[in-house]
Image (spheres, grey):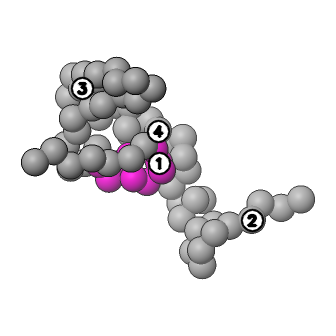
């Protein structure tokens, strides 16, 4: 059974930028910035930079909360 893609260009984007590449970029970025997470109930809260927000969004990982 072939994979089903959501969205018109989803397959092309997935082939162009695989999840393993996004994960590697995100991991590298978090390590380089010495990101620290805080455990809150069953969530981990981290403060991230703009680049990391984009990587987290592309990985469909987590929910964003703006502190203000």
Tag 4 near tag 1, CB within 8 Å: yes
Please report the bounds of the magenta region as a residue range.
53-61
According to the picture, the residue beneath numbered tag 3 turns out to be 35
According to the picture, the residue beneath numbered tag 1 turns out to be 59
Above or below 1: residue 67: above
Q: Is residue 30 visible?
A: no
Above or below 46: residue 7: below
Residue in front for this viewpoint, 43 or 10: 43
What's the distance in space between the residues labelled 3 and 1, CA to CA? 18 Å
According to the picture, the residue beneath numbered tag 4 turns out to be 23
The spot of residue 24 in percent (x, y) is 44, 35
Left or right for 50, reference 3: left
What's the distance in space between the residues labelled 3 and 4, CA to CA? 15 Å
Disc sitting over residue 39 in the figure: none
The residue positioned farthest toward the front in the image shown:
41
Q: Could you tell which of marks 3 and 4 lies nearer the N-terminus?
A: 4
Residue in front for this viewpoint, 46 or 1: 46
The residue positioned farthest toward the bottom in the image shown:
8
Q: Could you tell which of marks 3 and 1 lies nearer the N-terminus?
A: 3
User: Please, what is the dominant secondary structure of the magenta stretch?
Assistant: helix
Q: Could you tell which of marks 2 and 3 lies nearer the N-terminus?
A: 2
According to the picture, the residue beneath numbered tag 2 turns out to be 4
């Amino acid at each position: 059974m072939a994979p089903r893609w959501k969205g018109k260009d989803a397959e092309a984007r997935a082939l162009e930028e695989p999840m393993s590449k996004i994960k590697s970029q995100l991991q590298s970025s978090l390590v380089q910035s010495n990101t620290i997470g805080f455990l809150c109930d069953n969530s981990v809260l981290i403060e991230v930079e703009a680049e990391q927000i984009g990587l987290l969004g592309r990985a469909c990982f987590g929910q964003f909360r703006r502190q203000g």
